Amino acid sequence: MSLPLLQKTIIQKKIDLAIFLDEDLSIPYLTGFTPSHAVFIVGTKSVMYLTKLDSPPKMRGVVTKILPKEWTKKLVDERVRKVGINKKSMTVSQLESVKKVFPKAKVVDVSKELDDIRSRKTQDEVLRIQKACVITSAAFAALVKELPLKKLKTEMDVAFFLEKFMRSKGCTLAFPTIAAMGKNAATPHHVTGNARLKRGFLLVDFGARFENYCADMTRCVFLGTPNKEEKMLYTLLLEAQELGISLVEEGKSFVEIDAEVKKKLGKYAKWYVHSLGHGIGVEVHEEPFYRKGVKIRKGQCFTIEPGIYIPGKIGLRIEDTLHFDLKVTILTKASKKLQSVKF
């Protein structure tokens, strides 16, 4: 729980309290509990969780109460002069509600500070992400064994197989599974459909969510026997991805690494159309985002995921979730060697 870090921030900014509403993912980050119609209030010395649930969660150091119908009246305090909010996760109507509750208070955004805290994972957070990655990797290994049996006929079948496996291990989904057959994978965020499996690369981009924390992994498996060009493209991409991982070090910018990866891809770099990756935690996409000037810091978890997308022909991406401390650790350990299955 990173409540002390947030409380330190609101003290420094002279904020009386920070308020988080409903499905704001800052709530499970700060409490470990998935909210449902909740109000989470963080003061400089105390914390309160209000919910409409009959049985509010028990959290150490947190006062939990059933949310009264007229809950806003319970919160009005003339002494509150400054209220912090997570503007990135608050709707306009929610913001108006906060202003009505605290009409004399100045409302300030603490999303930047919160993102900074969230970007550096605790040991407990890393263990949860690691567990999600272990289950994600196991799901892919199971898929590779299942494909030769030819029971899976479509992209939908593949996605369902992976999702069923992850759920059977006690996980939910980090995001909707992408299963893209052949040229469909040339669209980086292809929507899984009823395309039938056939000879060619099958791309799967998926991840488990374990105790609120996400994994994100992309692998490609070849159905049938790849030709020389297909082998070359995959080998080149794998070398570029592994180069990117090898360049991870404290203080280096993600943009620098991205430039080296593109250099490795050579003439195929023009078919690499997205960023190198993203941070990961309670959200599958969170800080650090790979903007200019953003540098690698200890404690961060993020992805490295270059791709090659040739419209109407082929799409390839290889992605791993990583943790950086004194060194980089690959958390998604599923095989990345070119695997072909009889089909």
Image (cartoon, helix red, strand yellow):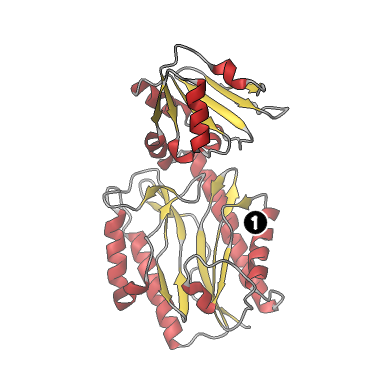
Query: Which residue is at the far bottom?
Result: 227
Residue under pointer 1: 166
The tally of labels here is 1
Residue 73 image-quadrant placement = top right
Query: Which residue is at the far top?
Result: 79
Q: Residues within 10 Å of mark 1 (few under 14, many from 20)?
A: many
Q: Quadrant of the C terminus?
A: bottom right
Residue 190 in the image: above or below residue 267: above
Q: Amino acid at mark 1?
A: Met
Closer-to-camera residue (307/146): 307
Residue 205 in the image: above or below residue 266: above
Q: Secondary structure at mark 1?
A: helix
At a point 56% along the width and 66% down the height, the residue shown is 191
The image shows residue 249 at horizontal and vertical percentages of 31, 52
Residue 156 image-quadrant placement = bottom right
Residue 74 in the image: above or below residue 340: above
Closer-to-camera residue (291/61): 291
At a point 38% along the width and 46% down the height, the residue shown is 325
Closer-to-camera residue (19/253): 19
Residue 277 in the image: above or below residue 250: below
The image shows residue 32 at horizontal and vertical percentages of 57, 35
At a point 70% along the width and 55% down the height, the residue shown is 168
At a point 38% along the width and 63% down the height, the residue shown is 274
The image shows residue 208 at horizontal and vertical percentages of 59, 54
The image shows residue 326 at horizontal and vertical percentages of 35, 46
Query: Is residue 44 at all visible to an observer of this figure?
Result: yes
Query: Is residue 339 at all visible to an observer of this figure?
Result: no
